[in-house]
Image (spheres, helix red, strand yellow):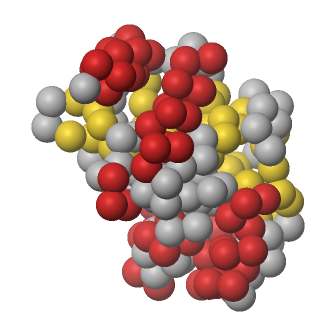
Amino acid sequence: MKSFILDTGELILVDTGLNFSGASTIKSTLEKNNYMLKDVKYIVLTHSHMDHIGGLKDLSKNGVFEVVSHNEDADAIQNSTGVKVDRRINDGEDIVPGVKVIYIPGHTRGNISLITNKVLIAGDTLRGVKDGISPPPSNFNANNMEDIKNLSRLLAYDFDYIALSHGKDFESGGKVAVEKLIAQISKS
Ligand SMILES: [Zn+2]
């Protein structure tokens, strides 16, 4: 499970790993890249699953940042972590200028991906598999039909690189790959 650091002039951390060890990996990765946890302005949580939010509590002890999630997952995140979601965002909103939210409910009610500079930060909306990308396994989805239907929301955006929480990032031709995936699913 991967988390992501975006430096847009303001530092954004996307997801927090599973638990204490996720949090300490994030801290050491920040330091390796000459950042400090206290430089992080926003923590965006793509959804409420524990492997994405488990490090939040530990990080919040040592950082001062705004916690951001979609409204539909915010209560679940607060209940699991004891950390307040400061900002509840909606589809099409910018976290900061140039980093936009794409709301794709299905994996969870409040699942989001982000798009910045032709990079899709998919979160769990897509995952890396041996021969490319796929949606999450149906038993991981709160509502699998909704998840599959909403994948097409990605096509409103232009992107090349897909950053994936699970599996190897898809480094180029991302949008064409998503178009193919959706066409394949709708045939089957
Ligand atoms: Zn998930």
Along the viewing direction, whichever of 40 and 85 lies nearer the viewer: 85
Nearest the viewer among 148 and 102 is 148
Query: x%, y% of residue 142?
Result: 49, 60
List x then y, in percent, for residue 151.
Answer: 50, 32
In the figure, 163 relative to 69: above or below? above
Q: Quadrant of residue 157?
A: top right
Ligand 1 located in image quadrant: bottom left
Q: Is residue 14 left or right of residue 38?
A: left
On-image quarter of the N terminus: bottom left
Which of the two residues, 37 or 60, is positioned nearer the viewer here? 60
Q: Quadrant of the C terminus?
A: top left
Residue sitting farthest toward the left: 130
Total marks shown come to 0
The image shows residue 154 at horizontal and vertical percentages of 55, 26
Residue 121 shows up from this direction: no
Task: Give the residue drawn at x 78%, y 32%.
Answer: 92
Along the line of sight, the residue nearer the viewer: 136 or 173: 136
Residue at the spot 68% in from the left edge and 64% down from the top edge: 73
For the point 49% across and 54% down, which residue is it?
143
Whether residue 114 is visible = yes
Task: Tell me residue 177's x, y (percent).
Answer: 34, 18
Question: Residue 38 vs residue 33: left or right?
Answer: right
- For the point 82% across and 36% down, the residue is 93
Q: Judge left or right: residue 20 versus residue 138.
A: right
